[in-house]
Amino acid sequence: MVSSSSSMVKAEAETPQEQVFINFRGVELRYNFVSHLTNNLKRNGINAFIDTDEDMGKELNVLLKRIEESKIALAIFSPRYTESDWCLKELAKMKERKDQNMLEVIPIFYKVKPATVKRQMGEFGDKFRNLVRSIDKETSNKWSEALEDVPLLMGFEVDEKRLIKRVVKEVKKVLMKTLAHASPNPQKCIAPSSPPQRNQKSHESSWGIEQRLKQLEEKLSHPRYKETTRIIGVVGMPGIGKTTLVTKLYEKLKNEFVRHVFIKDIHNISEAYKDQLLKTKVLVVLDNVSNKEQIDVLLGERDWIAKGSKIVISTTDISLTHNLVSDIYEVPPLSDRDALQHFIHYAFDDQEDIALRLGIFSKLLKDFVHYTKGNPLALRILGRELSGKDETIWESKLAALTQHHNSPPGKNTSMMLQRVWKGTYDGLSQNQKDTLLDIACFRSLDENYVASLLDAHGPCSSDARNVDIADLVNKFMINISSGKVEMHDTLYMLSKELGQDASALDGKGRRRLWHHHTIIDVIDKNKLNVNKFNNLTT
């Protein structure tokens, strides 16, 4: 055992680039101040290592190599510091790396004054002069210059309890600053927002977000989970606000972690991210995940995740979270009050506009909110689409959206339908698409009755149909409520538009007809060959 000791953040197999090297002298520091300091660093996601954890039998020069691999070095000056030639070798190496702008050095003065160290005064100086009597002049000068130089840096000289907290805080601050320039850059993972367009607010609505954020935080980072690794699945239908919510969460929590990353485009993820996140407590947000493989690329067997890390996975498919997450947060729709305010935010230009027009549009506002059932994206798109339009346009739009079985589906009723649902629909298999469009014909009917109708048509077996139905439930495209098959109004309308154009299994004609006039006309033209049709709904 050498008389000086060194401590750093260290990976089990490979030393990570964000390690902190601690230079100190004496067992009284090792088992008191340094022990408390390293424990506090660990609690803050910085895994501390002291020389007793280094593999036995290695040469002492390995500690100089550790300095070269470090981002930060803490030089703890104490009354006995200059008894050790190894402490001074480490200090000279730290100064060399600092002068090359390769290392941040933070001096800590433990029961010794900065001036005493800089000028080698008193007992501290006497011990140094005794030590260097047998040392060559060049080495002696290098050590003396290091003792004069390092104390000039901003450091700490306070009582022990406050000192540990301040040192940990400063280490995190410096790490975050140095890691901000490292690759990959977390901020580049977040898609840049588009510049405001006409009738588009320069800021987004935040109605309903605080309550959702509080509920999600409770599952992820409640004090009882502080030292626990948590993986939370954030799930819900398209447009319900998952991305907005996890982005807010990330912005709120990221400064509590040395390493943090928001990955919006999970499709382009690589092993480089895992290397950057290894062996320290991390905050990771994976947004818009659509298959298990995307999760496995980064998380793998999850054996690399440091204790205390927090990971959030946002997806429209709840099945992806099975046997993976600690808990699930299903994002709820906006309340009627929040949905109304959210819609008003986008539908009217300013407070004066709201005051002038709110009375006229009061009923229409409530009708649109009822139709969208609290879906924030649908409300935002409709609000922007209707902003500045007169009452007649509003009424026409609502009529087009709320048409049911008694009227034919409109062509391209609204881009809102495409924006909210088309991406998820396109990700379905052909069998799943067929099942969804068939179910749209029998919305709100008894679950068993719908199943029997589906089984009576098409090539799929009953078991295959059941699997498709379960997949659609997992993807929030349908739900079974009180024994009935239900579907969101916006998806129902899109299904009507898509269903009327879908090709028959033999590649001819349309498969699903809703309106009785259309049904009669098509049957007449095909000479009552009803076997051509899969679903006829009036």
Image (cartoon, rainbow, N blue to C red):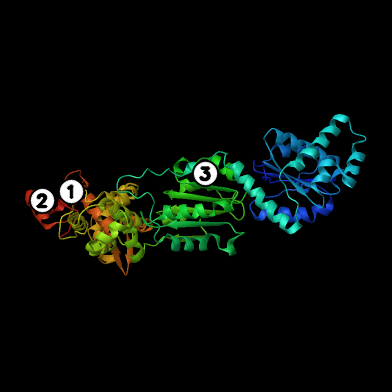
Residue receiving disc 1:
510
Query: What's the residue at 62%, 54% (across, down)?
Result: 307
Drawn side of residue 523 relative to residue 65, left or right: left
Amino acid under disc 2:
Val
Nearer to us in this view, 461 or 169:
169
Drawn side of residue 279 relative to residue 247, left or right: right
Q: What's the mark number on residue 452?
A: none
Query: What's the residue at 30%, 45% (across, down)?
Result: 198
Mark toward the start of the polypeptide (1 vs 3): 3
Residue receiving disc 3:
186
Q: What's the mark number on residue 522?
A: 2
Drawn side of residue 199 relative to residue 68, left or right: left
Nearer to us in this view, 182 or 488:
182
- Picture quadrant where residue 54 is located: top right
- State the SS at label 3: helix
Q: Is residue 292 above or below residue 453?
A: above
In which quadrant is the C terminus drawn? Answer: bottom left
